[in-house]
């Protein structure tokens, strides 16, 4: 252990001797570069942590968006059609992830009504979305293909 301490002291002495040989301007520039690099890394990590985790459920009226919302939230299967006039909005750990061990992040899910008069609600929530799920009812697809395409 004493040998390591002596070796570390020797390296520190060599580094100090080398630094004293360098012009002061070069040392100042090196310190400034290190400080700027640290500041950029800290700023990048702060911006990275604010990544959105919002998923928007969109689709035609009666396509099953609200049923999908409740299945993701608590695993329940709500039978029948429920026409939503306002958006369902919740942050939760997906029901399928509850049994998983390790780090599980909650997801913010917004179920936007599909009625044509409420399309402005979709425009309000899209800027905060990390992803969009467009729900189409497979049984009703052929009759609503034109509306789904729009």
Image (cartoon, rainbow, N blue to C red):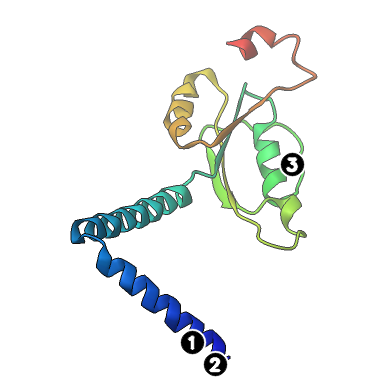
Which label sits on residue 2?
2
Mark 3: give few (<14), some (14-19) or many (20+) Cα within 10 Å: some
For disc 3, the marked residue is 78
Mark 2: give few (<14), some (14-19) or many (20+) Cα within 10 Å: few
Which label sits on residue 6?
1
**Are the residues tagged 1 and 2 within 8 Å (C-beta)?**
yes
Foreground: 37 or 118? 37
Sequence-first tag of 3 and 2: 2
Disc 1 versus disc 2: distance between alpha carbons?
Answer: 6 Å
Disc 3 versus disc 2: distance between alpha carbons?
Answer: 72 Å
Q: Residue at x 62, y 24 (%)?
A: 59
Element on which disc 3 rests: loop
For marks 3 and 1, give the one nearer the viewer: 1
Q: Is residue 21 left or right of residue 148?
A: left
Q: Quadrant of residue 136?
A: top right
Q: Residue at x 67, y 49 (%)?
A: 73
Name the quarter where the N terminus is drawn. Answer: bottom right
Please determine whether, in this image, residue 138 is positioned above or below residue 6: above
Element on which disc 2 rests: helix
Q: Is residue 20 left or right of residue 59?
A: left
Q: Residue at x 46, y 29 (%)?
A: 121
Image x and y of residue 143, in percent: 73, 9
For marks 3 and 2, give the one nearer the viewer: 2
**Are the residues tagged 3 and 1 within 8 Å (C-beta)?**
no
């Amino acid at each position: 252990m004493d040998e390591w301490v002596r070796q570390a002291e020797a390296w520190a002495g060599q580094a100090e001797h080398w630094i004293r040989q360098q012009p002061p301007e070069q040392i100042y520039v090196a310190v400034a570069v290190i400080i700027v690099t640290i500041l950029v890394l800290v700023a990048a990590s702060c911006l990275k942590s604010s990544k959105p985790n919002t998923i928007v459920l969109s689709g035609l009226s009666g396509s099953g968006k609200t049923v999908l919302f409740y299945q993701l939230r608590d695993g329940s299967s709500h039978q029948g059609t429920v026409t939503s006039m306002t958006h369902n909005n919740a942050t939760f750990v997906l029901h399928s992830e509850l049994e998983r061990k390790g780090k599980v992040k909650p997801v913010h899910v917004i179920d936007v009504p599909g009625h044509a008069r409420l399309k402005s609600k979709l425009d309000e929530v899209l800027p905060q979305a990390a992803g969009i799920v467009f729900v189409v009812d497979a049984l009703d697809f052929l009759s609503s293909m034109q509306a789904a395409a729009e």
